[in-house]
Amino acid sequence: MATAYWDDKRVKDRNGFWHLGHRPTLIAAFLYFDLAFMVWVLLGPLAPEIAKTLHLTAAQKGLMVATPTLAGAILRLVIGLLVDRIGPKLAGAISQVVVIAGLLTAWAAGVNSFTGTLALGVLLGLAGASFAIALPLASRWYPPEHQGKAMGLAGMGNSGTVLASLFAPTLAKLFGWNAVLGLACIPLTIVLVVYLAMAKDAPNPPAPKSITAYLQPLRSVDAWWLMAFYLVTFGGFSGLASSLSIYFTDQFGLTTVAAGYATAACVFAGSLVRPMGGALADSIGGVKTLTGVFIVAALALAGVSSAPTLAMALGLFVVAMLALGTGNGAVFQLVPQRFREEIGVMTGLVGMAGGIGGFYLSSSLGFARQLTGSFQPGFLIFAALALVALALLTVVKRGWRMNWGAAANGVRI
């Protein structure tokens, strides 16, 4: 059914990407993802203020900002299953309502302990699971040769982390960090209304399956490879987005507002290039794109580990985020080439792996700081993971090109 649908679309309209699919849905997916990601990483830019109020250790700060990432990783699988059962639009609406209600409750009741921050982190993890909603919502409207662009543009919603870094520290200074939880509900509600008005489920959804059938992709080793690569690319991006405010305040003594601006610059770079990464992967192949990504990311993160000045560290972080953001788009150019019929659950599985990588980086930086007095070991280990991913990609790429059959459809991998 899906093949016939796209063949018909290609005959009717040969004007390219912008004349295919459903632009209102693509825009709605981006906006939904953008605001969801804003609140997902909210604890990161607020962490210095929260730590002062609750007297948290370096390890507790790291665990606090890592908890939403881990919760989002786990919930992405659940949401991915829900998307394939009831459709991405309804799944997104339910998720957003729960997040708004939870934030309002936290604002009204107050968060007064480390345990409370962890509970809040679990709630914010549901916002992080929006990844498994926005991407299939947008991508199901587009044919395989445009998957990288569609997923990249929808996935550019991870720029919401920039909004959190820019505005949360200033609002916390003006009104107190707990008030930021309530204030975040205002844009969330506005975007929910826009989302409900503009988003539309694609006409070619996969046929319903049993719950166990959704986990079938895990029987393929390709699913595990893709999850491993995203663990590094998105894990690095989300882990840094959550942790950089802490790094800049602890390492260089910046104010929380200045640290937020520095973090926003780094995160903006990584968010901006995600659709470019998808487009580049469409052009030269996801494998070639990821090869460059892992090399650049490893070198930049290794350099950050011993950067002596703020300017050098900031520059290297921007380079690392540019590479990792490109890698995020490249991985999701590859996913639908191999698992188009299981795109909903694969989005959840791959996204879950990325969240686990982000949890590891955020928490390990905190523990490294507490145990050794330096962030260096955390950065070096993650740089090593990028090199391991490069070695694994080198091993599997030939088999992918021979067995996936993408070349027969004019798609580069």
Image (tube, rainbow, N blue to C red):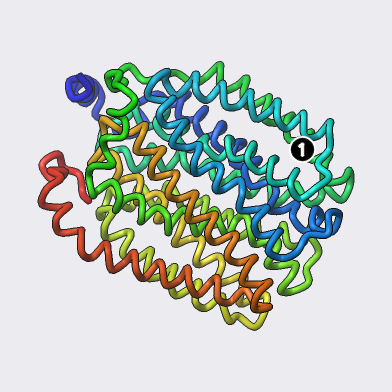
- Identify the residue at horizontal 37%, vertical 66% (top origin): 294
Residue 6 falls in image quadrant:
top left
Q: Quadrant of the N terminus?
A: top left
On the rendered structure, is 195 left or right of 43? Answer: left
Residue nearest the viewer, comparing 238 with 68: 68
Looking at the image, residue 306 lies above or below residue 271: below
Looking at the image, residue 250 lies above or below residue 71: below
Looking at the image, residue 5 lies above or below residue 380: above
For label 1, the residue is 181
x and y percentages locating residue 346 in the rendered image: 34, 38
- Identify the residue at horizontal 27%, vertical 38% (top origin): 217
x and y percentages locating residue 264 in the rendered image: 65, 55
Residue nearest the viewer, comparing 21 with 365: 365
- Identify the residue at horizontal 28%, vertical 39% (top origin): 336
On the rendered structure, is 15 left or right of 71? Answer: left
Q: Secondary structure at mark 1?
A: helix
Question: Is residue 171 among the parts visible in the rendering?
Answer: no
Residue nearest the viewer, comparing 359 with 176: 359
Instruction: Tell me which amino acid carries mark 1.
Output: Leu
x and y percentages locating residue 344 in the rendered image: 36, 31
Question: Is residue 40 among the parts visible in the rendering?
Answer: yes
On the rendered structure, is 76 left or right of 337? Answer: right
